Amino acid sequence: MSFCAPRSESPEVAAERGRMRDLLQSAIERLPAIYRSVFILRAVEEMSVDETARCLHVSDAVVKTRYLRARSMLRDTLGAQIEANAQDVFAFDGVRCDAVVSHVIAVLRRKRLIRSRQ
């Protein structure tokens, strides 16, 4: 799995990509070991269920169950982190709000979906 950024990527996009990578890595590291090992072998190393089972000396069913649980735990952890910070990321007030509303109204007027006030 390659984490190299495209050469034309802006510094802001590169920084956000790094932040997301750090969040994901942190969430993976907090998984219990039995789930983390399966997740890393399946998702990162791209091993098959059979290869993962042989490597960990467990059955295919155990690999499938642990992988699904690991993904669920990651989804819950990342969702909670994103939800907790969403207000800061998507602050929508003041000048930004006015600019977005003005843009939407201008588009609607051009499409003749609303009329100008007189």
Image: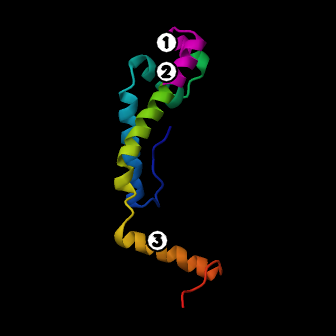
The residue located at (35%, 48%) in the rendering is 85
Identify the amino acid type marked 3: Val
Marks 1 and 2 close (CB-CB < 8 Å):
yes
Identify the amino acid type marked 1: Leu
Percent from the top left, x then y, of residue 24? Answer: 41, 37
Identify the amino acid type marked 2: Val
**Residue identified by numbered label 1:** 56
User: Is residue 114 inside the magenta stretch?
Assistant: no
What residue span does the magenta drawing correspond to?
A: 52-69
Q: Quadrant of residue 11?
A: bottom left
**Residue identified by numbered label 3:** 100
Percent from the top left, x then y, of residue 4? Answer: 45, 47
Percent from the top left, x then y, of residue 38? Answer: 49, 21
10 Å crowding of disc 1: few (<14), some (14-19), many (20+): some
- Label whose residue precedes the other's in the sequence (2 or 3): 2
**Residue identified by numbered label 2:** 38
